Amino acid sequence: MHKKVRHCLLICGTGWLLPLLTGCMGAAGGVSANEAFALSASALSGSESYGFAGKLAVYSPGGKVEKSASFKGEVSLHGNLKLNWTESDKASGVLDENERIVPGYKPLSLLEALNGRNASMAYATAPAPGEPVRIRIQLREETAKQRIADALRKELAEVGADERLYVRHPEQARKTLKASERRLEAALATLKVDTVVLWTANSKSWFPERMVEETELLYEWEGKTYSEKRTSETNFLAAAKVVQ
């Protein structure tokens, strides 16, 4: 229980939903960054299957990597997801849900928030013939904050729904859970989140090559200010590979 309701607001995923974007194929020249991203997202969502692989890291306030892990997976039949995690310093390598450095985090969950209503987009580098298209995406502050808040509330709700929590001392468990909910909401009221994404796509097929996210959090917990940072890199593979 104590570990589940600890104050650290480590970022969690909330599931993923590919954006319903449309567009036709073409070169990057002559289209805005928003249009280029829409074309790339459409190429991804239109793929019957694709693979992905990457890594996730959580940093201490001092800037040192506290924990890191790698992941790989595949999406097939327009939505069926397979995902495996590994951690280099774990003997067996494979991590289950409770062992992940950010429990509940899903590498593709960020796709849900990436659209013109929730973010501002600009070319990271000027488009050039034959070169990958690079787009810098800044999530709007409210969108970035809501993404984190929803995930944390969901995680705490899942803790409260576990019947094993109430076996020995049910009343005490309920009081502890309620107190944790109050502390979480108080922290969320002070939460500030900054999320920037670098999106790289093939300039001919528009299929994405890489999605790099950097998210920073600043919040207060019982009178003290805390900061956290997470980075993730997801590489997309046009030909899906079976997760081993």
Image (cartoon, grey):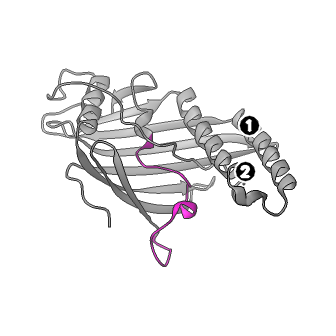
Residue at x-position 39% and y-position 27%: 115
State the separation of the CA atoms marked 2 and 1.
11 Å
Is residue 95 shown left or right of residue 134?
right
Nearest the viewer among 33 and 188 is 188
Secondary structure of the residue carrying tag 1 is: helix
Secondary structure of the residue carrying tag 2 is: loop
Residue at x-position 72% and y-position 54%: 6
- In reply to whether residue 2 is colored magenta, the answer given is no
Instruction: Residue 53 in the image: state x and y as whole percent.
Output: 33, 56
Nearest the viewer among 139 and 163 is 163
* Numbered label attached to residue 185: 1
Instruction: Residue 78 in the image: state x and y as whole percent.
Output: 29, 42
Q: Is residue 89 above or below residue 209?
A: below
Is residue 126 shown left or right of residue 152?
left
Asked which quadrant contains residue 122, the reply is top left
Name which of mark 2 and mark 1 comes first in the sequence. Answer: 2
* Magenta stretch prevailing secondary structure: loop
Residue 155 visible: yes
Asked which quadrant contains residue 24, the reply is top left
Q: Is residue 207 above or below residue 37?
A: below
Q: Which residue is mark 2?
A: 7
Is residue 158 shown left or right of residue 134?
right
Residue at x-position 51% and y-position 64%: 96
Q: Is residue 122 above or below residue 46?
A: above
Residue 1 visible: no
Q: Residue furthest bottom?
A: 91
